[in-house]
């Protein structure tokens, strides 16, 4: 696999070699209709052109119109055999030794669009969005901050992947500005709550599963089949207003402190591409109940990074480095647990991991933890930050580094703009 080479020139540091081929949706020109594509080097391959040319000629995709859609929902619903067929076709078409696309000048010019001129869109229509809370380090730090050292992690956390139902309507593509939310916060001094723009605006370094085939209402997904329901992963930033969150979250959990914006990266990296970077998941103590016990329990060695570019500055500075393998509960346990009560997942649903924090202070995945709720400051290019200021841009990224190649997710970014008057 590592020797595979494309006729499209790919820089050694590119996130998008032929081993990756992540899926997204784009417009080649502002007036174009949205269509599916895969990233290869500095280009996006227009799958609507490849399909129209009759080059998806395998038994499962030969007569499918899944790549003539304005989103990837139909393709992700087809399941793993179709995904494998598409990947094999695309890797062959893009390989250095295959003349079909390489030597067809007209098709190549139509189908290979420079990424610099493409407008990237949400890859799927997100019908439902759930955010989990699966990093032990993040959970423990939040418990220490909000509840104190007596019971930072509650007993139920070790028994099931905790989550809340988020707001799909405010899931946005990387590069979208985030308007500082207004809301209530704890009264300071008097008995009347503060009301106004959030004073504790934060990012959260997360990843998220894009659901493939769903399940019928009332029919849970077996833990050992859960991987077949995961199309791939994106980077996610679940923006959080910590002051609004702290005032509202008891007794029912997050609401307006979260629902004003969730940003995802444009490229979905498939589990097939991530397979060489699979790693053993941590051992759970106590052992999980039978419906959460996996024959093979795996995570992925995905390096994650968050940078802040302060308002008015050209350069960004790294504020945290973490890794997906720090999660306590696996992606498949999250999905299986979500369905155990009979809840039906649908193609394109988004399942966030929760903030991915590691054991070291420099691997804490949000400012709440990094600044210990504003008690300390982090230095970004010589500037102090306790929480995000207007004009600050947050840039998240993730990648897997192999011996012969790197695959990555590109970036997931957003800039804070002032609250509406």
Image (spheres, grey):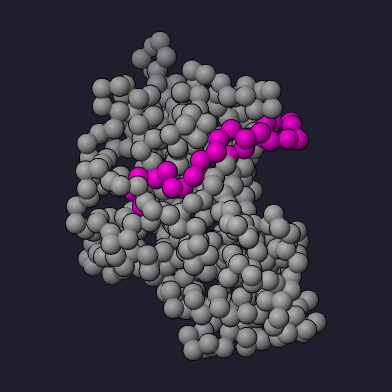
Examine the image and state in which quarter residue 211 appears.
Answer: bottom left
Q: Nearer the viewer, residue 306 or 128?
A: 306
Q: Which residues are magenta?
A: 306-330
96, above or below 175, in the image: below
Q: Is residue 332 left or right of residue 272?
A: left
Residue 361 percent across, percent down from the top left: 48, 29
Examine the image and state in which quarter residue 337 appears.
Answer: bottom left
Residue 395 percent across, percent down from the top left: 62, 42
Please name the residue shown 45% across and 58% down the image.
Answer: 278
Q: Nearer the viewer, residue 240 or 85?
A: 85
Q: Is residue 388 visible?
A: yes
Q: Quadrant of the N terminus?
A: bottom right
Find out whether residue 320 is within the magenta segment.
yes
Please name the residue shown 62% across and 24% down the image.
Answer: 379
Residue 268 percent across, percent down from the top left: 54, 61
Residue 354 percent across, percent down from the top left: 42, 44
Q: Is residue 171 visible?
A: no
Determine the residue located farthest toward the top in the rendered image: 189
């Amino acid at each position: 696999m590592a020797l595979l080479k494309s006729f499209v020139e790919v820089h050694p540091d590119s996130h998008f070699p032929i081993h990756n081929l992540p899926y997204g949706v784009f417009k080649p020109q502002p007036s174009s209709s949205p269509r599916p594509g895969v990233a290869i080097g500095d280009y996006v391959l227009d799958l609507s052109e490849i399909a129209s040319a009759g080059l998806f000629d395998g038994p499962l995709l030969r007569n499918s119109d899944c790549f003539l859609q304005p989103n990837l929902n139909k393709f992700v619903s087809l399941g793993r055999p179709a995904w494998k067929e598409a990947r094999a076709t695309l890797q062959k078409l893009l390989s250095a030794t295959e003349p079909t696309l390489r030597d067809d000048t007209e098709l190549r010019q139509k189908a290979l669009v420079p990424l610099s001129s493409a407008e990237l869109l949400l890859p799927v229509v997100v019908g439902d969005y759930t955010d989990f809370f699966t990093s032990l380090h993040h959970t423990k730090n939040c418990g220490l901050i909000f509840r104190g050292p007596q019971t930072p992690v509650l007993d139920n956390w070790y028994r099931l992947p905790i989550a809340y139902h988020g707001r799909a309507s405010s899931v946005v593509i990387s590069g979208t500005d985030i308007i500082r939310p207004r809301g209530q916060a704890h009264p300071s001094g008097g008995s009347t709550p503060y009301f106004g723009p959030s004073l504790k605006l934060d990012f959260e370094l997360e990843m998220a599963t894009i659901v493939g085939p769903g399940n019928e209402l009332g029919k849970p997904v077996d833990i050992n089949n859960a991987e077949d329901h995961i199309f791939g992963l994106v980077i996610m930033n679940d923006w959080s207003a910590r002051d609004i969150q702290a005032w509202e979250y008891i007794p029912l959990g997050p609401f307006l402190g979260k629902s004003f914006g969730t940003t995802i990266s444009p490229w979905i990296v498939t589990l097939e591409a991530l397979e060489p970077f699979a790693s053993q998941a941590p051992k759970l103590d106590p052992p999980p109940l039978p419906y959460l016990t996996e024959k093979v329990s795996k995570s992925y060695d995905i390096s994650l990074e968050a940078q802040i570019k302060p308002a008015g500055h050209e350069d960004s500075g790294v504020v945290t480095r973490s890794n997906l393998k720090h999660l306590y509960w696996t992606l498949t346990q999250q999905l299986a647990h979500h369905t155990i009560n009979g809840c039906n997942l649908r193609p394109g649903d988004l399942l966030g991991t929760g903030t991915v924090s590691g054991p070291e202070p420099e691997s804490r995945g949000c400012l709440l933890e990094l600044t210990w709720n504003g008690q300390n400051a982090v230095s970004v290019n010589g500037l102090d930050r306790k929480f995000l200021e207007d004009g600050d841009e947050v840039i998240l990224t993730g990648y897997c580094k192999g011996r012969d190649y790197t695959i990555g997710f590109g970036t997931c970014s957003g800039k804070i703009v002032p609250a509406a008057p």
